[in-house]
Image (tube, rainbow, N blue to C red):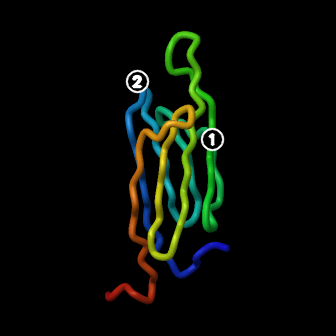
Amino acid sequence: MPHSKDVARMFKLETQYRGATLRLELENNQARLLINGIVRDRGMVTSSLRLSTTVQTDYEWHEFIEGIISREGKTLTAVLTASKAEVSRKDFAVIARDEVSL
């Protein structure tokens, strides 16, 4: 179930891997996995989500890329993996609208 009271803000995790730019984005519970700026998978985040694609990183060498987003309480964790090996991770604090002072 989406967390509708969350502030609309963009979360991004980006890294370089074997000459490719891997990026995992989340905005308004919509997630996207991008490789070199091209959206390769997308989905709606509830408590967790796995996005994936296969890309060629070297001559005749392919990698299985995954973007994993999970939420526990007020922490959102984004992870990028290449062929099941973690290449980047970041935790983000989630702020509810009723906690924002204007």
Q: Nearer the viewer, residue 5 or 83?
A: 83
> For numbered disc 1, what is the local secondary structure?
strand
What residue is shown at x 50% (from left), y 36% (from top)?
A: 85
Left or right: 20 with respect to 83? left
- If you read the primary sequence from the N terminus, does the residue marked by circle 1 or circle 2 appear first? 2
Residue located beneath label 1 in the image: 52
What residue is shown at x 58% (from left), y 21% (from top)?
A: 62
Is residue 97 depicted above or below 67 in this figure? below
| Residue occupying the far left of the picture | 102
What residue is shown at x 57% (from left), y 41% (from top)?
A: 66
| Residue occupying the far front of the picture | 85
Q: Amino acid at mark 2?
A: Gly
- Location of residue 78 in the rendering, given as x and y in whole percent from the top left corner: 47, 54
What residue is shown at x 53% (from left), y 67% (from top)?
A: 71
Between the residue at mark 1 and the residue at mark 2, the CA separation in whole angstroms equals: 18 Å
Residue located beneath label 2 in the image: 19
| Label 2 crowd (10 A; few <14 / some 14-19 / many >=20) | few
Quarter in which the N terminus is drawn: bottom right
Quarter in which the C terminus is drawn: bottom left
Query: In the drawing, what numbered circle is on residue 20?
Result: none
